[in-house]
Image (cartoon, rainbow, N blue to C red):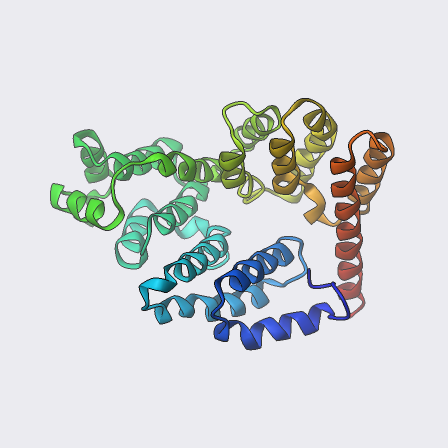
Amino acid sequence: MAHCGDLGLREWYALIKENIEFETEEQTLAVVFQEILHTWKYGMLADDQILEIFSKISRLEMTVVDEALITKAALINQFCSEVVASGLVIPADQMSAEECYEVISYQAKSKVQVYTFMKLLFGNSNIDTETKMKFMRGLQRLDAEGIKDLDDILDRQGGFTQQAAERHRKDFGGYEDRDAILELGCLAMLPQIDHKKKMFNDFLNQIGFSVKSLAEAGKYIYIGLTQAQKEELAQTYYQNIERVFEGLHRDYAECVFRTLSPAFLGRQDDEDRYTEILKRVGYSNSHFKNMLIEEIELIKLVIAQKEGLKAM
């Protein structure tokens, strides 16, 4: 984390900004990318700062020409996709079905990026869910029904032909197991609060979700919500997290904690709620206890950072 050792947040940010484009070691990149996203998630990087880093990292993919460095390209691809899916680079309300297909056709270099742009489409509250689902299913299956649906949706753009379907299949492959995982991120982006509440409860009760699918869908569940709606989901989380650790598999419970924790809200209430839970857990679950201690320390850091920004 940025607060480790004697390195302050500003110094850490400056170090990243000045040196990230020169890093070639894939393991180091994986750690650094995760730290950047984590620090941004918890509000310790401003949007303009993450955009500055995004600009540098997005250009790195063009430097990957050696097939031996394909993992590096994938890491860059994943990082950029996480930032784009937030709506920071392209606002979701600007992503129509026509715009989505055009961006996919000209910019997407992988299946992950295809779903990244579809996440923005799914996050657009001005488009009905049926159109979103037909668009996604059409690109997934590319069968006769899917091609017809896409042709209708993209009518103003000249439609969608069998030739277009063949090009898409050639560039991104057909439907496979990971499509079922990636589409969950799109579903989590649907903006209706009732839908998000149901999905959130399914996460907490492990209804239809594995560790892998929760890790994909959970990171998008808070996107597009108002502060009050985020706090409502946070309340549900705090009411259930102890039960999750008591009744579900340790790995799944940890994924719930890591993915859905409202600590990013940086409220005193979050520190207080976790402190209360820590007292109740005691020594009954050392793994859970250690995670709670780490999260409380992180919340304190987030609160201190927010107070520091107010004082500036």
Q: Quadrant of residue 247?
A: top right
Residue 93 image point, x, y percent? 44, 49
- 99 left or right, relative to 165: right
Q: Is residue 297 above or below residue 203?
A: below
Name the foreground residue: 161 vs 237.
237
Residue situated furthest front in the rendering: 68
Residue 243 image point, x, y percent? 72, 24
* Quarter the C terminus occupies: bottom right
The answer to whether residue 164 shows anywhere in this view is yes
Residue 166 image point, x, y percent? 16, 44
- 241 left or right, relative to 68: right
Residue 276 image point, x, y percent? 85, 35
Name the foreground residue: 54 vs 226.
54
Residue drawn at x 72%, y 24% is 246
Q: Is residue 195 above or below residue 291?
A: above
Name the foreground residue: 93 vs 57.
57
Residue drawn at x 81%, y 44% is 271
Residue drawn at x 26%, y 36% is 138
